[in-house]
Amino acid sequence: MRTPTSRLVRCAQPLLMLALLLVTPYQISGQGAHAPICAFVTAGMSGALPQLPTFCEQKSPSEAAVYSPTNVLEGSMRRAWSTALFQTLQNAGASGPCSEHACHISISDSVMSQRLVHYEVWVDKDLAGRMRTAAAPLGGKDSASDQWYILWWISLGIVSDSPWPPSAENAFSIAGDACQAYTRAAEPLNAVGVLHNTGGDWPSPQCSVLLATKDRVDAVLNFQDSFQAGTANYAALLIETFGKSFEFPRYEGDVIIRTKFDRGFRRYEMYSLRMLGFLWGEVQSGTRTEPQAFFVLSTLSGSRGQEEEHIFSSTQKEDEIVFRNSAVVRIVPAAGRTIAEPAPPGDGFLVDLTDGSEWLVSRDALDRCKLEVGREVTALGSGSTVPALNAPRGGDACNLNASFVKGW
């Protein structure tokens, strides 16, 4: 993606990073039974798809719930109904009831309500512009393009209506079950190793949960070598295993395909759980075939983590920015103490991230930026500059003044 300064950006999960442009936090204000949002939405939906009923309940002047009494989001009308809704909401922001103040919209259908989950999105006058900015580098010229459609879906917030809130234990359990499903599904592929003179079947990829919190879960698949990990069908299995398990649960995170270091290099690929869940829904609804879903996964979703053992990235050039989004897996005192023990001034801690990188951070920076396991961070490197690590803090970023150590 070319920025206005013509510097190339290589970022983790490019579609997800672009989708962040579409999410803007607003405060809901006002109560009452006003209905201009619902009148606009139902008129737009009935005009586009008169054969499918769309209900709407306006909860306040700036909040509404859109609902279909049929299975439109998991069935054969998924693409048609969701595209019509996305276009209607863009129009509501451009020239409708959400043009003067932002609107908070929740979205559901008959199946989602039974599963106690719904989507939500903020709509305002700049929504269409943000979407256009995000879709253009991907080739999406208008709201009917596949790029707009995908960006819309992955920018939707997923909200659980269950009385049992998300938890680290639940995240670990779901990811663990997905790991088992993946290992079973991969067994037939292991025999391919015989065809490549490897001395027998490939060993099954070792799957484990790398990180689990109430908000995020990451799993890692360890492969024997880069040749095995690069076999396309192994990545394709992610959709039918992890995608199926994480279509609705409200957890961010990645599934990582990883190999050991060999002469200072390894394969380290990261696939978003959100994208995998979206693609599983596309396949199950008949919107895409399995090969079509894998094409989207391989071209628009996968990103590279820490592939080099001793340097942050050798691909950094004067006109290139390397950007990675990840989370803290563990924090280990470099001098062998526990985190709770006082550390001398200047003493550091080793921080391991889900992107496979390890950093040295001071006690002062840990406290100042409130860094802890599960906290999301961003790593940034540009040209010959020293790579930097930041922890988002509200609308700002806290500079950890960290030093890159190695790939772990």
Image (cartoon, grey):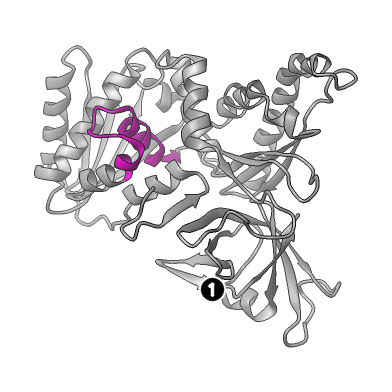
Question: Which residue does the image show at 83% across and 23% down from the upper left?
Answer: 202
Q: Quadrant of the C terminus?
A: bottom right
Image side of residue 389 versus residue 296, left or right = right
Q: Residue furthest front?
A: 318
Q: Residue at x 51, y 30 (%)?
A: 297
Q: Is residue 301 above or below residue 232?
A: below
The spot of residue 203 in percent (x, y) is 84, 25
Q: Please identify the quarter of the rendering in which residue 390 is found.
A: bottom right
The spot of residue 256 in percent (x, y) is 66, 40
Mark 1 burial class by Cα count in 10 Å: few <14, some 14-19, many 20+: some
Question: 13 or 1, which lies in front?
Answer: 1
Q: Is residue 84 visible?
A: yes
Q: Nearer the viewer, residue 102 or 285?
A: 285
Looking at the image, residue 166 lies above or below residue 50: below
145 or 165, nearer to the observer? 145
Residue extending farthest bottom: 345
Q: Please determine whether, in this image, residue 169 is positioned above or below residue 71.
A: below
Residue 402 in percent (x, y) is at: 63, 72
Residue 187 falls inside the magenta stretch:
no
- Give the amino acid at mark 1: Asn
The span shown in magenta is 134-159
Inspect the magenta stretch and tell me whether residue 157 lies in it.
yes
**Which residue carries the number 1 mark?**
399
